[in-house]
Amino acid sequence: MQRDPAASIEGPPSWRAALLTLAILSVSFGSPLLVIVGLRDMQAALHTDRSVLSLASALVWIGNGVGGIPMGWVADRIGIRLTVLLGALCMAGGLALSSVGSIWALLAGHGLFIGLLGNGAMYAPLIVYVSRWFDRRRGTAIALISSGQYVAGIIWPTLFGLAIARYGWQATMLGYGAVVLATVLPILALLHPSPGSKPAETGQTDRPESHRVAGLPPNLVMGLICLASFCCCVPMALPSSHLVAFCGDIGIKSGAAMMSVLTACAFVSRQFWGAFADRFGGLRTVMAGSTLQMLTIAAFMTTRNEAALFAIAGAYGLGFSGIIPAYSVAIRDLFPSHEAAWRLPTVLFTAMSGMAFGSWFAGRIVDVFASYRPAFAAGILFNLMNLAVIVFLVSRTVLRRDAWLASVAR
């Protein structure tokens, strides 16, 4: 019997797939946090500049973005289980390599194994996988699974801080590699293939490839979205990668706890942003979240009071958390659904590249100026460029919608 086109593919299996994916990402995103929490200890042990250690964190984001593009293709051919299995094994191997105690091992372990082959085989393929389980509440679902990054931020920084203080950063890396394997591998047996895609709603994801998007060539819009994602993720990387070190530099010892507060607020608000995206669309969600992100980054420059910084970190978590999932929703809003396997990872690649550059760039600025204030100021400039691009795209979609309504009224 032919399925009713109006029927939704969503159901209990959809949410089960989303929750299992959330559990996997909550573990996989813990791996790059080790360098963030142990930054000062590792700098002292390895006798190197902070920018070099920031580069390890940056390489994870670059590897994650680059790896997501081919791994999306691989997942479509060998299945999501084998793809994520490859990622888990490589991530554990990368943590073991990074614990050797040399700069080259740290960079190779993080860039190649934790980033490219580890998170690269998990994050983007799992985003595409879950998006195919949903047709009505896709924004909510993507926001939920993307919150794995913040669940990791809630759970792991404090535990890493305690473990590093007691056992050292090298033993902590080895131990976390075992945790990755012990948690991710059993979950894989519960993942089922996603259902066939439901026919897209008219005028949305069923557009032919030659159709103009917001009155512009589709690939031009794609390029602008990629540019916007890079520019917003440069400032996003500052608190995400340097908050603990920033607090340590100004004599505040609760940096790891502050990071947990930031990520807890991000997790809660990301669910709001997912519902917001379902109602108002991905581009407007990016615009709102990016504005709040810029305001809170500016606030980091104004105080060194511990209580105030806790409040600012929480507000920052509320603002930036919905931006990355909203880009995924925007791609599904604007482009045909069969293009998701390459468009989504490509946008995530540019976003992760922005995170990588921002993490390294902030570390380099601190090496030169011995202060994070110039880094925050540079982040605000990048955020303004992001908003200029997004406001332009939103205005184009509004103009096209108004023109369509006017033609229908006639």
Image: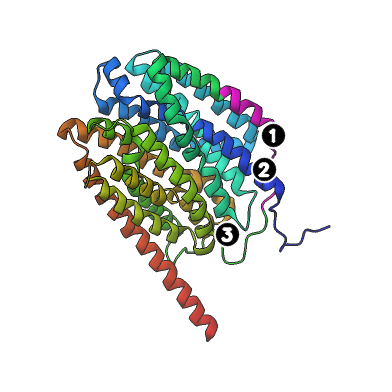
Q: Is residue 331 visible?
A: no
**Residue drawn at (39%, 19%) of the image:** 164
Instruction: Tell whether position 191 is magenta.
Output: yes
Q: Marks 1 and 3: CB-CB under 8 Å?
A: no
Quote the CA–CA distance across marks 3 and 2.
25 Å
* Magenta-span inclusion, residue 19: no
- The answer to whether residue 327 shows anywhere in this view is yes
**At x 26% / y 28%, what residue is drawn?**
51
Dot placed on the residue nearer the N-terminal end, 3 or 2 = 2
Instruction: Give the residue drawn at x 52%, y 38%.
Output: 123
Q: Which disc, if any, is residue 205?
A: 3
Q: Are marks 2 and 1 in contact (CB under 8 Å)?
A: yes
Viewer-side residue, 75 vs 6:
6
Q: Start and end of the magenta stretch?
A: 181-197
Secondary structure under the numbered disc 3 in the rendered image? loop
* Residue appearing at x 58%, y 31% in the figure: 84
Q: Circle 1 sits on which residue?
A: 190
The mark that comes first in sequence, 1 or 3, is 1
Between 45 and 286, the one lying in front of the other is 45
Q: Amino acid at mark 3?
A: Thr
Mark 1 or mark 2, which is nearer the start of the sequence?
A: 2
Note whether 216 is above or below 350 in the view shown.
Answer: below
Reading the image, the residue beneath label 2 is 16
In this rendering, which labeled residue sits more in front, label 3 or label 2?
2
Mark 2–mark 1 Cα distance, whole angstroms, equals 9 Å
Within 10 Å of disc 1 (Cα), the crowding (few <14, some 14-19, many 20+) is few
